[in-house]
């Protein structure tokens, strides 16, 4: 199923229209001098590591101080990540909290031998975590689906992205080893 998803996405080079009401998941002040874009897949363990170990430091030192903002964009690597991205994107009022929770507890919902099993685990996890919404409505919402797919398409077209997490800082792909020390050095040069 993963191969089918990727084949459809790239072979047909889909250009999807998106409803303007679907908002980006952003942390930091909108008018910050530095924009960081993080292309991530919710089933990627390296992305979960970025969220647990690097993002909190960025938040404390650069986002909360107004120096930078971070936009979390979707680059699902499989159907499970695709559906989780749709769920996170579906609740614009709670999307950052859902994203943080899904990364912090990735092993609690990423289990299963089929997409149906993983979706059931995802839905059950979110209910236990206290997120209340119509799960089926979120994963079947075509506007959100298009929004998520467009993130992935734009990532490939604009930045030649093929792995997650990939970081873009003020429009330039971050090519060093992804750790806080290296990101901090790059950010300090832009201040």
Image (spheres, grey):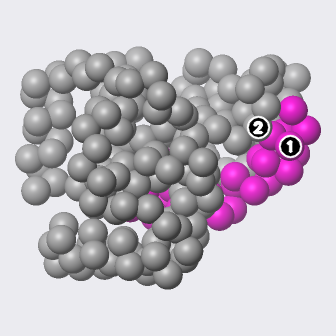
- Please say whether residue 65 is one of the residues in the magenta stretch: yes
**Residue 158 rendering spot, x and y as whole percentages:** 41, 18
Q: Is residue 52 left or right of residue 127?
A: right
Q: Is the C terminus in the top left, top right, bottom left or bottom right quadrant?
A: top right
What's the residue at 48%, 28% (across, down)? 21
Disc 2, SS: strand
- Please say whether residue 27 is one of the residues in the magenta stretch: no
Q: Quadrant of residue 78?
A: bottom left
The crowd level at tag 2 (other Cα within 10 Å; few <14, some 14-19, many 20+) is some
**Residue 64 rendering spot, x and y as whole percentages:** 86, 43
Q: Is residue 53 left or right of residue 133?
A: right
Q: Which residue is mark 1?
A: 64
What's the residue at 18%, 23% (across, down)? 14
Q: CA distance from mark 2 to mark 1?
A: 6 Å
Q: Is residue 109 left or right of residue 62?
A: left
The crowd level at tag 1 (other Cα within 10 Å; few <14, some 14-19, many 20+) is some
With respect to residue 170, does 6 lie above or below?
below
Q: Are marks 2 and 1 in contact (CB under 8 Å)?
A: yes
Q: Main secondary structure of the magenta part?
A: helix
Q: Quadrant of residue 119?
A: bottom left
**Residue 103 rendering spot, x and y as whole percentages:** 53, 64
**Nearest to N terminus: mark 2 or mark 1:** 2
With respect to residue 139, does 111 lie above or below?
below
Q: Nearer the viewer, residue 137 or 82?
A: 137
Point out which mark residue 28 bears: 2
Q: Nearer the viewer, residue 118 or 10?
A: 118
Which region shows up in magenta? 40-66
Point out which mark residue 55 bears: none
Disc 1, SS: loop
């Amino acid at each position: 199923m993963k191969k089918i998803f990727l084949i459809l996405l790239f072979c047909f080079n889909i250009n999807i229209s998106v409803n303007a009401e679907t908002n980006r998941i952003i942390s930091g002040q909108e008018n910050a001098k530095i924009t960081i874009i993080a292309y991530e897949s919710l089933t990627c363990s390296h992305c979960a590591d970025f969220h647990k170990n690097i993002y909190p430091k960025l938040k404390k030192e650069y986002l909360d101080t107004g120096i930078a903002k971070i936009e979390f964009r979707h680059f699902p690597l499989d159907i499970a990540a695709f559906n989780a991205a749709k769920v996170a994107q579906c609740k614009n009022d709670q999307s950052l909290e859902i994203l943080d929770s899904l990364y912090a507890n990735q092993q609690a919902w990423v289990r299963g031998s089929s997409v149906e099993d993983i979706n059931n685990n995802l839905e059950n996890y979110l209910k236990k975590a206290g997120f209340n919404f119509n799960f089926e409505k979120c994963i079947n919402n075509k506007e959100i689906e298009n929004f998520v797919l467009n993130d992935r398409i734009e990532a490939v077209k604009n930045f030649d992205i093929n792995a997650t997490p990939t970081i873009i800082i003020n429009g330039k792909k971050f090519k060093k080893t992804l750790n806080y020390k290296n990101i901090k050095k790059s950010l300090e040069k832009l201040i």
